[in-house]
Amino acid sequence: MTAEIRAKIRKTKEALKSIGYIAANVSPGEFYDYMTGEIFSEDTTTLRDVLGNQFLMVHELAEISELKKMGRAIDKRVIMESPKTTIYEAHFMAMDLELKYALYEEDYFWIKVRLKQHKESVLKDDSNLPETLRPRGEGIFRKFMAIINKKNDAKQ
């Protein structure tokens, strides 16, 4: 598993570089611990799900990178032991990068799917979301919905 994670991290760092983001160095052990660690949300995404999807890899690697850049040690408890504002700031940066990468790859279906999930799970029902960060989450939704709507208008 370590070799597979290492290869996916390397490939994903290149994907992130293609949209102008330089990821922190993340070891396979850190990635594994983060993906299998404790969380406060009801997210059911598995390590296997992430390793099998380039966009989820972009999201998770960016999220871990942001946490590392904020000085957080990456282990199985980083989500539970970090301030919620820190976790959501990293999550929103990762979401923005994931959707930018999907845009770069012209995968508009993925963007629509993720925006729907983002609206339902974060903007609508997430009691853990600090109110001070709600505008950031809503801004990501509006920004990418506008892009999708523009694409749809251009097709008609």
Image (cartoon, grey):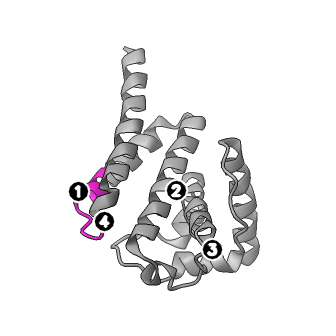
Label 4: which residue?
A: 130
Q: Where does residue 109 sit, x and y in percent of width and height?
A: 44, 39
3 or 4: mark nearer the eye: 4
Q: Which residues are magenta?
A: 119-129
On screen, 151 above or below 94? above
Does residue 130 appear anywhere in the picture?
A: yes
Question: Which residue in the structure is indicated by mark 2?
Answer: 94
What whole-number distance in Å separates the C-alpha atoms at marks 3 and 1? 28 Å
Expressed as whole percent of the image width and height from the top left, the position of residue 48 reads 56, 69
Q: In the rendered structure, are the residues bearing label 4 and label 2 in contact, judged by CB atoms less than 8 Å apart? A: no
The residue at which mark 1 appears reads as: 124
Closer to the N terminus: mark 4 or mark 2? 2
- Callout 2 amino acid: Ala
Residue underneath mark 3: 31
- Tags 2 and 3 in contact by the CB under 8 Å rule? no
Q: Is residue 91 left or right of residue 122?
A: right
What amino acid type is highlighted by mark number 4? Pro
Q: Which tag, 2 or 3, sits closer to the chain's start?
A: 3
For the point 36% across and 78% down, the residue is 40
Quarter of the picture holding the N terminus? bottom right
- Front residue of 55/135: it is 135
The Cα atoms of the two marked residues, 4 and 2, are separated by 17 Å
SS at mark 2 in the image: helix
